[in-house]
Amino acid sequence: MSQQSTHEEKQLVKLIEDMPIPDETKGNWIERIETDGLNEELVDEIHAVLTSDSAQVKESTHLIQTNANFTRIVRQWRLTQQTQSYKKRS
């Protein structure tokens, strides 16, 4: 089910496109974001890849910046989700 992407999801898609990881993984993540939206399971999966010491991720300076941007986007997304949940309850 396709849904309208939030600002944070659009930012995350751009960040994923610039990540130093295989294109197949990028495509899978982007497709999941576009069809189902961002969720905690996907956030955990992306975070695991960013923090792993695998050979896939080679550029350490770029990785540090990517990880910082990812963390910022996820925090903003979580805040937005909590705000929407609060508004629905009120």
Image (spheres, helix red, strand yellow):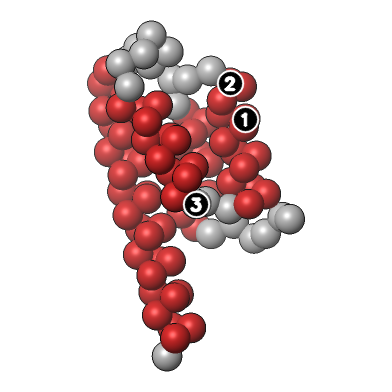
Q: Mark 1 or mark 3, which is nearer the start of the sequence? A: 1
Instruction: Name the amino acid type tagged 3.
Output: Asn
Q: Residue at x 44, y 26 (%)?
A: 19
Kindly identify which residue carries mark 3.
39
Kindly identify which residue carries mark 2.
23
| Alpha carbons under labels 3 and 1: distance apart | 16 Å
Instruction: Name the amino acid type tagged 1.
Output: Gly
Image position, residue 85 (x, y; %) = 44, 75
Q: Is residue 59 shown above or below 15?
A: above
SS of the residue under disc 3: loop
Label 2 close to label 1 by CB (< 8 Å): yes
Q: Does residue 66 appear anywhere in the picture?
A: no
Kindly identify which residue carries mark 1.
27
Q: Mark 3 or mark 2, which is nearer the start of the sequence? A: 2
> Depth-wise, is mark 2 or mark 3 nearer the camera?
3
Q: Is residue 11 shown above or below 17?
A: below
Instruction: Name the amino acid type tagged 2.
Output: Asp
Image position, residue 10 (x, y; %) = 53, 49
Quadrant of the drawing holding the C terminus: bottom left
